[in-house]
Amino acid sequence: MLHVIVDDYGDDLKIAEKIRKYCQRKSPWIFHFDTGSCNGCDIELLAAMSPKYDFERFGCLLKGSPRHADIFLVTGPVTRKCKDRLVNLYEQIPEPKVVIAMGACAVSKGIFQNAYGVCGPLDKIIPVDVYISGCPAKPEAIIDGIRKGVEILTRKSG
Amino acid sequence: MHKLMVPFGPAHPALPEPVYLKLFLDGEEIEDVDFSVGYNHKGIEKALEETDYFKNVFLSGRICGICSSAHSTCYTLGVEKLLNIEIPDKAKFIRVIVSELERLHSHLLWLGLLGHEMGFDTLFMLAFREREYVLESLELITGKRVVHDINMIGGVRRDLSHEIMVKLVKNLEILEGKVEYLRKLVRKDSLIRRRTLRIGKLDKRDVEELCLVGPVARASGVLYDIRRADKYLAYDDLNFKIVTQKKGDASARTLVRVREMLESLRLARLAIAFIEPGPIKVKPFLIFPEKEVISRVEAPRGELIYYIRSNGTDKPARVKIRTPTYANLISLKKILVGHTLADVPVAVASLDPCLSCTDRVTIVKNGKEKIIKWEDLHDHEHH
C-alpha cells in the first residue's frame, strides 16, 4: 500500500507525481492495435485476459482509447493502409510509453515477406521496446512480455 | 432534417479488427451505412503465387488465425485434386476432428465477443474459460493452440496416438456439459434475449438475394452447409444434423451457433471413434499438371472457396479465395438500417465478421488496365 501523508500543501505536485508513478507501475493500461494480423495474436491476447491466464491480476487492462494507455501493443505486419493510423495512434499515447511488438509478423513480417501490401516490420516505423515472438505468441509469453514492458515503463518514468 | 454522420472505427473499442463504418443518423436511428475495409489488406493472393505449393500450406493457414485449418484444408484439398491423389482415411478423420474443434473454438470465441459487445462481460469470461478446453485439445493433437498447421499436401503432419485420443475424449466430455450450460444460458437469460431479439433481421429472401453463407444463412432458415452439399473429407461417413432457425435475427444466429457447437462436439467424438490404425500421409507425385480446380469447405463462418490454377510449374499461377465474411459483409446495410446506434455493436457482431481474410483491392475502370499510384489510392478511400 502507498502511504501518503499530506502535511505540506506545497508538495501537492510531488505527491501527484508519486501517485502517478505508483499507478503506472501497478496498473499499466494497454492499448491494442491490429495492423493487419491474421487474428491469431489478437485472440491469444484475449485468451491471456481470460480466467486461465488472467493478466488482469497484474492490474493490466485493455483500453479502447490510446490517450488512456501506457503500453501500446501492436500485432500484425503493418499494412500500407494502417501505417498512417499507427503513427497517429502512437503520437496520441502520453509519455512515458512502451511499445510491444507481438507475434512474428510485428517482429519481422513473419510469413508475409512477399506480400506487396506490407510495409513493416513494426520497428521500421515506430520505436519498439519489447518483442514477443511466436506465431501466434502464447499467453504465457504475452504476460512475460507485458511484465518486461512494465519494467521498462518504470525505468522510463524515472 | 440535418443528418449526422458518425464514424465507427477503424480502431474502435467494440471491434477487435479495423473496419471503418460511416453511420448516417436521423436522430438516433440509422438511415444509411457505408463502410470501408482494406486496413488488413496484405496481398496474400499475390504472395501465394510467389511461393511453391508446399510452403503455401502454411501461408494459407495464416490468412485467418481463427479459421486457419479451414483455410489450409481447403487449399490442400484443392492441390490434392490438382495432383489427383486420395489421402488415407485416418488423415481425413484427423482433419475432420481438427476442423470441428476449430469450429467449436471459433463459435465460443464469438459468443464471448458477443457478450462483450452487449456489456455482459461475465459471458465473455465464461465462454473463454470453456474455450481453453478446446485449445488444450487442439494443442494435444497438433502441438499448437491457435494456428494449427496440421495439414500437408497428401495427408496430415502428426499422428493421433492412443493416449492423446483418451485425453481428447475426456476433454470433449467435460466440454459437452459446459456447452450445454451455455446453450441454456443463451436461451433463458433475459439480458441476452433482450439485446438480441429482433436485431438485424434478415429473412429467407434477403439471404437468397444477397447470397449469404454459413450460420447467418442457416439462422434465416436456409438449409445450406458445404459439409452436406460437397461431402468433402469424411463427412459422408459421419452422421450429423444441420442446425437451422427461422427467425433470422441476432438471437437466432446465436442459437444456431450454440447448437452447432454441440453438433461439432458430437462430430468430433464420432470421428475419434471411427479412427483405425493406418498411414496418415501419402507421398505426392510431384508433377503439377496444367489445370484449374475449385475446392470448398465449410469454415466456421460459412462457405470458403479456393480457386487454384496451375501452369505446370511448382508455383500456382493464380489462387483466388472467396471467404465467408466477404460474402456476408454486404448484408451490413440490411442489418443496420432502422436500428439505433446502441445496437450497432451487437448487430455487427452477430455476423461474426472476420476482416483479416476479407480485405481486397479491386480496380475496374471501363475494362482498361490502369496503374494507380499509392498516393492516389490513399486519396481515393476518403471520398
Image (tube, rainbow, N blue to C red):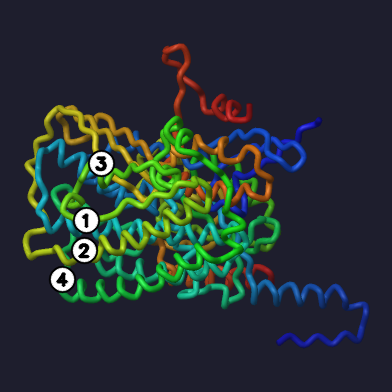
Q: Check the residue under mark 1 and report the chain it is in.
A: B
**Identity, as a three-letter code, of the amino acid under mark 2:** Leu
- Mark 2 on the same chain as mark 3: yes
**Identity, as a three-letter code, of the amino acid under mark 4:** Ser
- Looking at the picture, how far across and down is residue A1, in whole percent? 71, 87
Q: Which mark is residue B229?
A: 3
- Mark 1 on the same chain as mark 4: yes
Identify the residue shown where x is 45% and y is 43%: B220
Q: Which image quadrant is residue B262 in?
A: bottom left
Cβ–Cβ under 8 Å for marks 2 and 1? yes
| Crowding near the residue tagged with mark 2, few <14, some 14–19, many ≥20 C-alpha atoms within 10 Å | some
User: Marks 1 and 3, Cα distance to the nearest angstrom?
Assistant: 14 Å
Is B31 drawn above or below residue B177 in the view shown? above
* Residue nearer the viewer, B178 or B2: B178
Q: Which mark is residue B239?
A: 1
Q: Which mark is residue B161?
A: 4
Q: Is residue B186 visible?
A: yes
